[in-house]
Image (cartoon, rainbow, N blue to C red):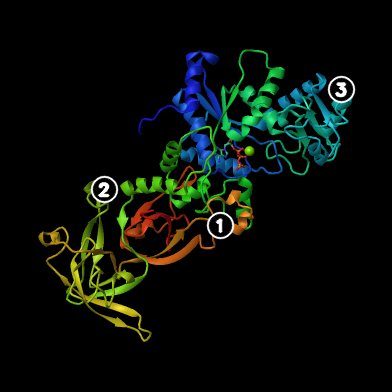
Amino acid sequence: MEERSLNFIEQIVEKDLQEGKNDGRIQTRFPPEPNGYLHIGHAKAICMDFGIAQKYNGICNLRFDDTNPSKEDVEYVDSIQQDIQWLGFHWGAVFYASDYFQQLYDLAIKFIKEGKAYVDEQTSEQIAQQKGTPTQAGTESPYRNRPIEESLALFEKMQAGEIEEGKMVLRAKIDMANPNMHFRDPIIYRIIKSHPHHRTGRKWNVYPMYDFAHGQSDYFEGVTHSICTLEFVVHRPLYDWFLEQFVTGDYRPYQYEFNRLNITYTVMSKRKMLQLVEQKIVRGWDDPRMPTISGLRRRGYTAKSIRDFIQKIGYTKVEGTIDLSLLEHTIREELKETAPRVCAIFNPVKLVITNYEGQGETIEAENIDGHPEFGTRTMPFAKELYIERQDFLENADKNFYRLSPNGREVRLKAAYIIQATHCEKDAQGNITTVFATYDPTSKSGTEGGNRKTKSTINWVECSSCVDATVRLYDKLFTVENPSADERDFIELLNPNSLQEVNCKVEQTLKNEMRVLPKKDGCAEQHHYQFLKNGFFVVDEDTTDEKLIFNRVVSLKE
Ligand code: ATP
Ligand code: MG
């Protein structure tokens, strides 16, 4: 990996280490809410959180931020673990915010007893109306100064399940006039009874809000650097305030923020992605058009390409949007070096070599041209081949360098030089067969094989080639920034984001007709470059009877 200068978080960490903070201990966490699949934005956070721990001999724990049972599910818990492992990272331990429900509840009781929290019986609308504006103080709730005993008793009733959802909340009693709106008596507990919790079942009827749970969980676990994205900058004073109310020793966690990843032509909110899945606009969370880790994996992105991309874009303190083409560039550069080349004919027309005698032969073709170390493959060759329809023109002008009955010589990739003689058509005038003659002394790899032609065309041999379905993907959205558009994002979908095409591929790909083996629950990735058509990966829908490929990315931008 190329040398790079320290990012600003690494600089902070190195300074803390130099100053001997926390006895040189570095601990981070990655805190996803299990309410959806991870997306490439999360990969940016993962590379930071796990990367810091790796680089400075620390620990990064995985903490599921599972404080809202109405949206969370074990399916998400499982997929998140799988995706992190696939990306190549290892956590110290797996924790859940729900591990701390008792501690957080006890802390809430302590806050009430110290006059720092109260039960509010207003509706959420009323509370919102009283918030004020950044320049105008909010209005105090009529319940703000109720006796401590009353709040205590009501909070216990809330937890006992005796109060209806939405009827009461617990609020921190801080400052309704604070210029930071988050200090205006934030809600710290709400009632949720509609859904059981995926781990604690029906034990709890009250659940802590993010601001009350996150810093405290960091503290309970011993996190030193709690790294998140810039939208939490405004929450940081509150993060600090809560800790200051109960932490007594020297140790406490600190929060640092970097810029979120946004990518053009993409939405990355889990709520929106869930809508695409539920409305069956895509085939699932792992649809190759999705920006999820599982979708990118199925599309053929490697874990390395995702890590390289994150490294390229870096970490700053200003929001911005990254061009989708940079992500595509990263995988293209990698596959150029590693993917074996094969012929796939997308719009076939038959080619008959009239002077070819005998039963056929085999051609040894290099998997990657000019790189014998990547090995060779065998291509059957015979009298009847398929070539791309657009590689033949009956009446071509002098600028057309491919096949035409004009005496021009063209090389069949890795094989012989041919010259077209004529063609046959059906009643509608469509060309059904192209005829040519070949030069038996021109075989690639022999002495005559060095003769140059203006062009080389791809082919597969008719009797040995295999039918395959290829899925060609385009951008999921038609506008660069679907989230900033005033139209609903569903209206901005690209109707042509998936196109399925049948093609004929060379025999060597028969080996891929089977169920792909799985590693850590993820199907292995088998990549190819289909000459002149792009980079492809075997899709996990492939069986021992049908071959299905996804186009990862085209050959050029
Ligand atoms: P969403 O809005 O998609 O639901 P989220 O921020 O609510 O995302 P979490 O599961 O809470 O998702 O996120 C876990 C961690 O990943 C957080 O630390 C968050 O800051 C980080 N994260 C989420 N989205 C991005 C992004 N686009 N770029 C960088 N980091 C992100
Ligand atoms: Mg969140």
Residue 361 got which mark?
none
Residue at the spot 36% in from the left edge and 30% down from the top edge: 3
Q: Are marks 1 and 3 in contact (CB under 8 Å)?
A: no
Label 2 to label 3, Cα distance in Å? 75 Å
Residue 536: x percent and y percent?
Answer: 39, 55
Q: Amino acid at mark 3?
A: Ile
Residue 342 quadrant = bottom left
**Drawn side of residue 266 relative to residue 486, left or right:** left
For label 1, the crowd category at 10 Å Cα-Cα, with few meaning under 14, some 14 to 19 and many 20 or more, is some
Would you place residue 221 above or below residue 358 in this image? above
Residue 226: x percent and y percent?
Answer: 58, 27
Residue 208 quadrant = top right
Residue 374 got which mark?
2
Residue at the spot 89% in from the left edge and 23% down from the top edge: 147
Question: Between disc 2 and disc 1, whose residue precedes?
Answer: 1
Q: Of residues 535 and 263, which is closer to you in this image?
A: 263
Residue at the spot 66% in from the left edge and 31% down from the top edge: 97
Residue 400 quadrant = bottom left
Q: Which residue is mark 3?
A: 148
Residue 448: x percent and y percent?
Answer: 11, 62
Q: The N terminus appears in which quarter of the rendering?
A: top left
